[in-house]
Amino acid sequence: MSGHLAAVGFHVFEETVSDTTAQMVASRVEEAAFAEATASDASDEAGLIRIYTARAGELLRAEAKKLGVPSRWGSGGDAGVTATEAELTSSGMLVGDEPASGGESETSSDEEELSALQRLVQKLALRKAEQEEGGEGEPSGEAEEDLEPLLSSFDVAGVAEYIKSGKCGNIIFMAGAGISVSAGIPDFRTPGTGLYDNLQKYDLPHPTAVFELDYFQENPAPFYLLAKELYPGQYPPTPTHHFVRLLHEKGLLLRCFTQNIDSLEAAAGLPHERIVAAHGNFDSARCLKGHPADVHRVREHVDRGEVMRCESCDGCDALVKPDIVFFGENLPERFARLVAEDFPKCDLLIVAGTSLAVHPFAGLINHPGEDVPRMLVNREKVGEMDESTRAIAKLIGRGTGFDFGETNRRDALHLGDCDAGFEELARLLGWEDELKALVEKGRAQTPVKERPS
Ligand SMILES: [Zn+2]
């Protein structure tokens, strides 16, 4: 999605899988290969690129095999540079239109193909650098030292001023678990919280096993217990959720991308079309063979602490799972579609309450243009890269994360509690009373469990 690899493109034939699936695969492969390259002990650029491209090549082939489709490298993508058809062909990347679908007979040996990929990635990096120097066609083409800061200060006050200036009307809000903590939603990853301790009686190999398909198939009980604890309707939205709703009411919110499965954005009154539940939620459920399940029946089972099996009439009997995205599963199609649609329009990105550890969600911070201000509201500083990681990211055309250092020109930071941060922002915007009223109204409404009738 963001790097040269995606620009070079992993083109799965469109008639076989959707464009968004292809995008998603490219993004996932890019992420995994990047993580391995930066975690490796290679110290020079050539070594890093070698690891990155080798791993990316392997993963792409594996993904294509998994999808049961022939793969090829093609042109396209949104990184601002693309390879020409001729370059792709001569580099050996562009396999003909009829590659062997069996996968074993390649037109070139693996090794040749990978070194060709290496050359191509380097070439694209060079071309991008030239474009930026020459200022041709790139909005960010000016020399770096001429760039004015995009915010008057890199804090809540600077962002408030930016919003008040009327320069933005398409704010994207990215939400993580941290914005729901003050609602009382238990963090199952933290030892000592009731939920984690409850899960421990199941002897989970590690806390996140509860979101792994293999584990779920053998032992679905811990997930059902977690579902009971987290089921929407038991917790009130927080001031942060109400602030997002205010952004919407003021006509400033383009979309709220959330990692949370608690549906508190909707509970705060944000319309469903404004919300992208990147990791799914409890609004729908299916059996592991894909049959849709009645969410009211699911709710009854969850309440009783019983594992549900498919009730479709053909005697399927597979385990039923709410549409929460487990590790290794693709994100909802809507996520990829709206990422592509929304981020080019984004004129302010607000990131709140997330450690930016889970991809591809975390990578979204790199999607707004380089002249778009961003703000992180979180207990810890996250999303920054160290110098060597930044170097390799640049080289392969990936975004370089937040920059709160000396070269910062657009990233505001509020370290601390999310609610405090957004209450402060609301005050500076003159929305204090409106936010208070929403929060009080929300608290007065004792959370009602949406019991199935
Ligand atoms: Zn079924």
Image: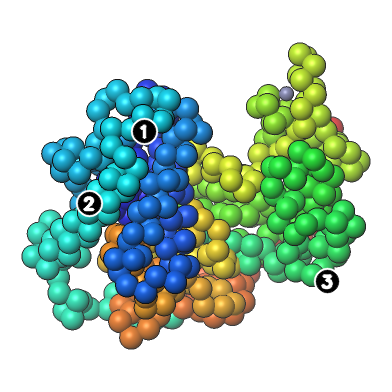
Q: Looking at the image, is mark 3 or mark 1 nearer the viewer?
A: 1
Label 1 crowding class (10 Å Cα cut-off): few <14, some 14-19, many 20+? many
Choose the circle earlier in sequence order: 3 or 1.
1
Which numbered disc covers residue 192? 3
Disc 2 element: helix
Percent x, y for residue 226? 79, 51
- Residue at numbered disc 1: 71
User: In the orientation shown, which residue stands out farthest toward the bottom?
Assistant: 406
In front of the other: 111 or 275: 111
Which numbered disc covers residue 120? 2
Q: From the viewer's perspective, tell me whether residue 307 is left or right of residue 46.
A: right
Residue at 37%, 83% in the rendered image: 405
CA gap, disc 2 to disc 3? 50 Å
Q: Assign ligand 1 to one image quadrant.
A: top right
Percent x, y for residue 268? 64, 55
CA gap, disc 1 to disc 2? 17 Å
The image quadrant of residue 260 is: bottom right
Q: Quadrant of the C terminus?
A: top right
Residue at 56%, 74% in the rendered image: 378
Disc 3 element: loop
Residue at 61%, 72% in the rendered image: 419
The image quadrant of residue 134 is: bottom left
Res. 394 in view: no
